[in-house]
Image (cartoon, helix red, strand yellow):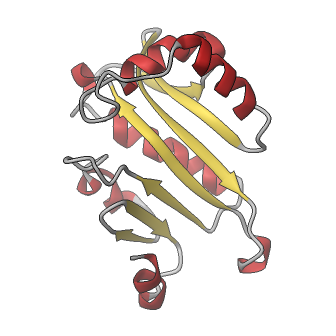
Amino acid sequence: MNDVLSCRAASKADLSEILRLYAQPDLDDGKVLSVSEAERIFKRMTRYPHYTIYVAVCDDQIVGTFALLIMDNLGHLGTPSAVIDDVAVDPAWQGRGVGKMMIHHALEVARKKGCYKASLSSNLKRERPTLSTSHWASSVTGTVFVSASNVLVTNEPDEKRFRQFL
């Protein structure tokens, strides 16, 4: 891919494009929030510590989006963990590395925040996987656990943790 892709935090002005991405048949199948409802929720989300909607951009065009939550934990000596959710790529851009770039960006943010793991959440009703893990998991440091609804990336390669995850 020769196109220059980048990720940035989404703004209120991006919401209509984000909703367009969520309207895809494999995601919300055309049933999305109104822009005003999305603005209300987006405003509330900005009050959550370390919860950010990101957009993937190429030539000022939004071609993908995901949400990243960095959460505190009482376990693991208070070490935070990350949840990657609401991943969507414009159909015209699928298969061109957008999803891989977004996941790598999310994992880099999680690493910088000191997270010991990151999990990728996916809708149980979805017929296709959120992302093809073979496209990005091989370059992830740690162990990748996969279940029907999630992909878990952790630096703790522990089979007991994998069984608990499933």
Q: State the residue in front, 6 or 51.
A: 51
For the question of whether residue 52 can be seen, the reply is yes
Q: How far from the left and from the top, in percent, is residue 63?
A: 38, 21
Q: How far from the left and from the top, in percent, is residue 120?
A: 44, 55
Which residue is found at the position 55% from the left and 39% from the top? Answer: 67
Which residue is found at the position 64% from the left and 17% from the top? Answer: 39
Question: Measured along the vertical axis of the image, is residue 158 above or below residue 23?
Answer: below
Question: Measured along the vertical axis of the image, is residue 27 above or below residue 79?
Answer: above
Q: In which quarter of the image is the C terminus?
A: bottom left
Q: How far from the left and from the top, in percent, is residue 125?
A: 28, 49
Question: Measured along the vertical axis of the image, is residue 86 above or below residue 43?
Answer: below
Q: State the residue in front, 98 or 34.
A: 34
Residue extending farthest to the bottom is 160
Res 99 → quadrant: top left
Tally of numbered tags: 0
Q: Quadrant of the N terminus?
A: top left
For the question of whether residue 1 can be seen, the reply is no
Q: How far from the left and from the top, in percent, is residue 80?
A: 71, 63
Which residue is found at the position 31% from the left and 21% from the top? Answer: 30
Question: Measured along the vertical axis of the image, is residue 107 above or below residue 156?
Answer: above
Which residue is found at the position 46% from the left and 83% from the top? Answer: 164
